[in-house]
Image (tube, helix red, strand yellow):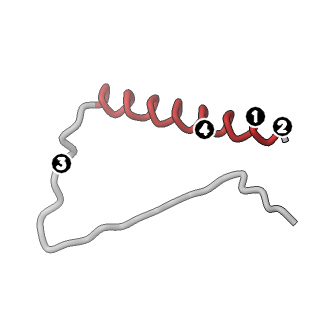
Amino acid sequence: MPIEIKELHIKAVVAGKEKPAQAAISQDELNKWKKEITKEVTEKVLRILQQKNER
């Protein structure tokens, strides 16, 4: 019986002895990365769905 994951939340906490560093990337660069990741994931999902329909 297949399972379907509709939503996945990942939370990580990283702690060390050093003082936490400030983010070195700009908001524009962060948005660019988010768009690239979203595009790649969407393409992979569509490719998998297409392969599934071809079977």
Q: Label 2 amino acid?
A: Asn
Local crowd at mark 4 within 10 Å, few (<14), some, or many (≥20)? Answer: few
Kindly identify the residue that appears in the image at 30 percent across and 67 percent down: 14
Q: Label 1 amino acid?
A: Gln
Q: Nearer the viewer, residue 49 or 18?
A: 49
The residue under label 1 is: 50
Residue 9 pos. (x, y %): 56, 57
Question: Where the C terminus falls, by quadrant?
Answer: top right
Kindly identify the residue that appears in the image at 22 percent across and 44 percent down: 23
Above or below, 31 relative to 49 = above
The residue under label 2 is: 53
**Badge 2 or badge 4: first in the primary sequence:** 4
Which tag is nearer the camera, tag 2 or tag 4?
2
The residue under label 4 is: 44
Residue 46 pos. (x, y %): 68, 34
Q: Nearer the viewer, residue 38 or 7?
A: 38
Q: Label 3 amino acid?
A: Gln
Local crowd at mark 3 within 10 Å, few (<14), some, or many (≥20)? Answer: few
C-beta proximity under 8 Å, tags 2 and 4: no
Left or right of residue 27, residue 51 in this image: right
Kindly identify the residue that appears in the image at 79 percent across and 61 percent down: 3
The residue under label 3 is: 22
Which numbered disc covers residue 31?
Answer: none
Query: How far is mark 2 from mark 4, CA to CA?
Result: 14 Å
Mark 3 residue element: loop
Residue 48 pos. (x, y %): 70, 41
